[in-house]
Image (spheres, grey):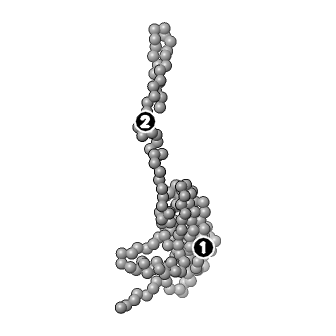
Amino acid sequence: MTEMTTTSDGDNEPQVSTRKTTRRGGGDPATRGRTTIADGVVEKIAGMAARDVVGVHAMGGGLSRTLGAVRDRVPGGSKSVTRGVKAEVGEVQTALDLEIVVDYGVSIADVARAVRENVIAGVERMTGLEVVEVNIAVSDVKLPEEEEEEPEPRIQ
């Protein structure tokens, strides 16, 4: 920042003197330092955004859903919102792979489009990263007469 002052000497000629003032910290606070976002953070955001779409029954493939159901039943365990989501995060961009199960009767193309839009909007809004691609693999269709895939409790 430069500050200018005008003074007058005896012959009414203004003289301009400049002096440089410095700001503490060296500039805009938003540019001081780096922010890194872990893959798991982006995976959680994407998982939550994908689950919000009507027509998405579950996330992940058969084995991961089965293991997740067992993990969910363990006391103190929590639902894994990252199940079925894989993120690759760079400094300014991210790419996502999602594996979903859709409800029977819905348009898979419409569900995939809605998931892609919701995930991109959520991740970009919350992280500031550019989402370059969202790959969606539909691994199963949930039929109305199918029971939930939770293992039966073992009695000992």
Check the image and report above or below for 107 versus 34: below
Residue 50 makes an appearance in the image? no
In the image, farthest residue toward the bottom: 156
Residue 79 position within the rendered picture, expressed as x and y whole percent measured from the top left: 43, 73
Screen quadrant of the C terminus:
bottom left
Residue found at x 50% / y 78% = 65
Q: Amino acid at mark 2?
A: Arg
**On the picture, is 86 further left or further right than 154?**
right
Q: Are dots 1 and 2 in contact, CB under 8 Å?
A: no
Residue found at x 55% / y 63% = 88
Q: Amino acid at mark 1?
A: Ala
**On the picture, is 127 further left or further right than 104?**
left
Residue 5 position within the rendered picture, expressed as x and y whole percent measured from the top left: 45, 21
Whole-angstrom CA distance, mark 1 to mark 2, is 52 Å
Residue found at x 55% / y 84% = 144
Residue 135 makes an appearance in the image? yes
Residue 73 position within the rendered picture, expressed as x and y whole percent measured from the top left: 40, 80
Query: Which of labels 1 and 2 is toward the front?
Result: 2
Secondary element type, mark 2? loop
Check the image and report above or below for 8 versus 134: above
State which tag comes first along the sequence, 1 or 2.
2
Rendering quarter of residue 137: bottom right
Q: Nearer the viewer, residue 69 or 18?
A: 18
In the image, farthest residue toward the top: 11
> Label 1 crowding class (10 Å Cα cut-off): few <14, some 14-19, many 20+?
some
**Which circle marks residue 23 in the picture?**
2
**Which circle marks residue 137 in the picture?**
1
> Label 2 crowding class (10 Å Cα cut-off): few <14, some 14-19, many 20+?
few
Q: Nearer the viewer, residue 113 or 29?
A: 29
**Which circle marks residue 69 in the picture?**
none
**On the picture, is 106 further left or further right than 148?**
right
Residue found at x 59% / y 75% = 138
